[in-house]
Amino acid sequence: MEPADVNLYLVGFMGTGKSTVGRAVAGRLGFRLVDSDHE
């Protein structure tokens, strides 16, 4: 699977762990993480 072919969006309430899960998933799959809380 090419990273350019896949986008994954995590949506939810504040404080539910979206950024933590996003970092873990991105690291595991070798994807780049874009966190809108920090952009």
Image (tube, rainbow, N blue to C red):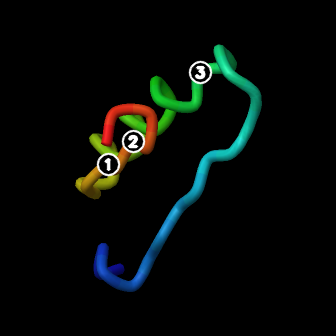
- Could you classify mark 1 by the number of other residues whose Cα lies within 10 Å: few (under 14), some (14-19), or many (20 or more)? some
Element carrying mark 2 = loop
Location of residue 17 in the rendering, given as x and y in whole percent from the top left corner: 59, 21
- Could you classify mark 2 by the number of other residues whose Cα lies within 10 Å: few (under 14), some (14-19), or many (20 or more)? few
Disc 1/disc 2 C-alpha distance (Å): 6 Å
Location of residue 5 in the rendering, given as x and y in whole percent from the top left corner: 39, 85
Q: Residue tagged by mark 2?
A: 35
Q: Marks 2 and 3: which is nearer the front?
A: 2
At label 1, which amino acid type do we have?
Answer: Leu
- Front residue of 17/24: it is 17
Give me the residue at 58% from left, 57% from top. Answer: 9
Disc 2/disc 3 C-alpha distance (Å): 12 Å
Element carrying mark 3 = loop
Element carrying mark 1 = loop
Disc 3/disc 1 C-alpha distance (Å): 14 Å
At label 3, which amino acid type do we have?
Answer: Gly
Give me the residue at 24% from left, 54% from top. Answer: 30
Q: In the rendered image, which quarter contains the C terminus? A: top left
